[in-house]
Image (spheres, helix red, strand yellow):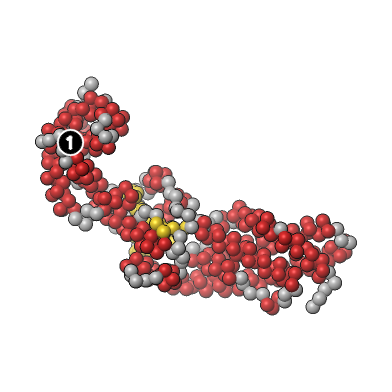
């Protein structure tokens, strides 16, 4: 049905449409500022922008082309955004609140433009009322559809048991003949950007392990600024998958620091990688780093990039130890004297043979490094320059695998050990 003020409605809508490139970012910025759930990672943020733009375009088409309310459907981008909200267990209330805030902002734009057009007061009021009615009707109808989409996706997502999700991830990782489209359908997620996997676990006997796993997931979200996907493997183990358009940037030092507040929680990180093959590789990386961490039996953060070489030996520790004993000899002793000598040799070799740099790294006097290096060479039976690569690999892998397990030294013997390793050298 035509209305007398339809020409003015179209004029106002036309002005908004002409300035949409400027107005749409204002609306999405408002959502991000006001609603915490809208502070997404890059990929989901792009979907939120697409959802907003598609709704604004649909509203403007309705106003300018006189499209009937019966013909209104949920725009595809808005429907996909609602599904993503459900998958991440974000609040439906937050999603609906955004639509009402957006409706209010749109009506405010029309009021501002009507004031600029300056029609007679009664015409302006009738036009404003007409636009408000149409926009409200559009929002009501779209929200009704979104609720169905969200709840349906939530039921579908919840129906996928944790065991099934874990199995699907494993299937995508292990099935080399699986193409990208099939893998994405299996996981209900995009695999075309960057990915980074993490594994989280708590030891048996941990009180409320799920609370610890949730805390670890929150730490990862804070460290990356992204909303992760999670897979509950069992009560004590969780996989966390971070996905984004750009390469994930994670402050590992801060994460390791924050993790100390959770002494029963361990986290490993795979290396960031792209695409389907990258998804598989970062998952394997996280699992390999976990094998190193479990062998070392120390909680905390383990980053695959730091233990990639050692991870190659994590399932062959006995053979690795036999080889290391042949390379290091008495330097692989279990007493604290041998442990200090190993630490010094590693620092000395990392410093490319600089006694000064090694001393600075160890916070000891340069003469102490001289003494310890000389002592280590006596135990090896040859200079460090001989078989240097073998020595470095053996020291690195033994340190990261916790070989050997040195007993805690009694307090009364620490002075004697200091003398033995040259700590008092001047």
- Residue occupying the point 37% across, 62% down: 277
Q: Residue at x 12, y 33 (%)?
A: 378
> Could you tell whether 107 is left or right of 44 in the image?
right
Q: Horizontally, is 222 left or right of 400 in the view?
A: right
Q: Quadrant of the N terminus?
A: bottom right
Residue on which disc 1 sits: 384
Q: From the viewer's perspective, tell me whether residue 122 is left or right of residue 363.
A: right
Residue at the spot 84% in from the left edge and 63% down from the top edge: 124
Kindly indicate the quadrant of the structure image that contains residue 60: bottom right
* Position above or below: 184 against 392: below
Q: Nearer the viewer, residue 389 or 86?
A: 389
- What residue is drawn where x is 14% and y is 43%? 327
- Image location (x, y in percent) of residue 271: 37, 53
Q: Position of residue 20 (x, y in %)?
A: 69, 59
Q: Tell me the quarter of the picture where residue 125 sits.
A: bottom right
Please count the marks in the image: 1
Q: On the image, which quarter does residue 369 sit in?
A: top left
Badge 1: residue crowd in 10 Å (few <14, some 14–19, many ≥20): some
Element at label 1: loop
Image quarter in which the C terminus is found: top left
List the single residue furthest toward the left: 381
Can residue 200 be seen at all in this image of the molecule? no
Q: Position of residue 402 (x, y in %)?
A: 22, 47
Query: Residue 63: percent from the left, percent from the top?
Result: 74, 69
Q: Is residue 112 visible?
A: yes
Q: Nearer the viewer, residue 249 or 254?
A: 249
């Amino acid at each position: 049905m035509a209305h007398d003020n339809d020409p003015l409605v179209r004029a106002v809508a036309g002005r908004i449409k002409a300035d949409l490139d400027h107005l749409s970012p204002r609306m999405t910025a408002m959502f991000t500022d006001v609603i915490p759930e809208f502070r997404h990672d890059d990929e989901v943020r792009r979907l939120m922008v697409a959802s907003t733009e598609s709704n604004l375009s649909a509203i403007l088409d309705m106003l300018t082309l006189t499209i009937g309310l019966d013909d209104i459907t949920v725009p595809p981008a808005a429907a996909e955004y609602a599904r993503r909200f459900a998958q991440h267990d974000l609040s439906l209330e937050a999603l609906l609140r955004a639509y009402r805030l957006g409706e209010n902002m749109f009506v405010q734009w029309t009021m501002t433009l009507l004031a600029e057009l300056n029609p007679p007061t009664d015409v302006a009021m009738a036009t404003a009322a007409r636009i408000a009615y149409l926009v409200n009707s559009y929002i009501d109808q779209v929200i009704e559809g979104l609720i169905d989409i969200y709840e349906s996706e939530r039921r579908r997502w919840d129906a996928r048991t944790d065991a099934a999700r874990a199995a699907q991830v494993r299937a995508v990782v292990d099935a080399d003949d699986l193409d990208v489209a099939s893998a994405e359908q299996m996981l209900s997620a995009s695999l075309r950007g960057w990915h980074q996997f993490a594994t989280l676990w708590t030891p048996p006997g941990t009180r409320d392990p799920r609370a610890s796993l949730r805390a670890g997931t929150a730490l990862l979200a804070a460290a990356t600024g992204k909303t992760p996907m999670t897979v509950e493997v069992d009560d004590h183990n969780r996989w966390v998958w971070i996905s984004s358009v750009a390469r994930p940037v994670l402050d590992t030092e801060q994460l390791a620091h924050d993790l100390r507040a959770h002494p029963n929680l361990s986290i490993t990180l795979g290396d960031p990688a792209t695409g389907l093959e990258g998804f598989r590789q970062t998952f394997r990386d996280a699992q390999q780093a976990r094998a190193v961490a479990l062998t070392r039996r120390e909680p905390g953060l383990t980053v695959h990039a730091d233990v990639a070489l050692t991870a190659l030996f994590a399932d062959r520790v006995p053979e690795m130890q036999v080889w290391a004993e042949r390379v290091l000899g008495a330097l692989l002793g279990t007493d604290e004297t041998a442990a200090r000598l190993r630490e010094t040799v590693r620092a000395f070799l990392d410093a490319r043979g600089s006694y000064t740099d090694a001393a600075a790294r160890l916070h000891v006097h340069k003469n102490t490094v001289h003494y310890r290096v000389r002592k280590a060479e006596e135990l090896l039976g040859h200079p460090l320059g001989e078989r240097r690569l073998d020595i470095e690999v053996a020291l690195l892998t033994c340190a990261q695998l916790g070989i050997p397990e040195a007993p805690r030294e009694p307090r009364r013997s620490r002075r004697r050990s200091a003398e033995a390793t040259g700590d008092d050298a001047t």
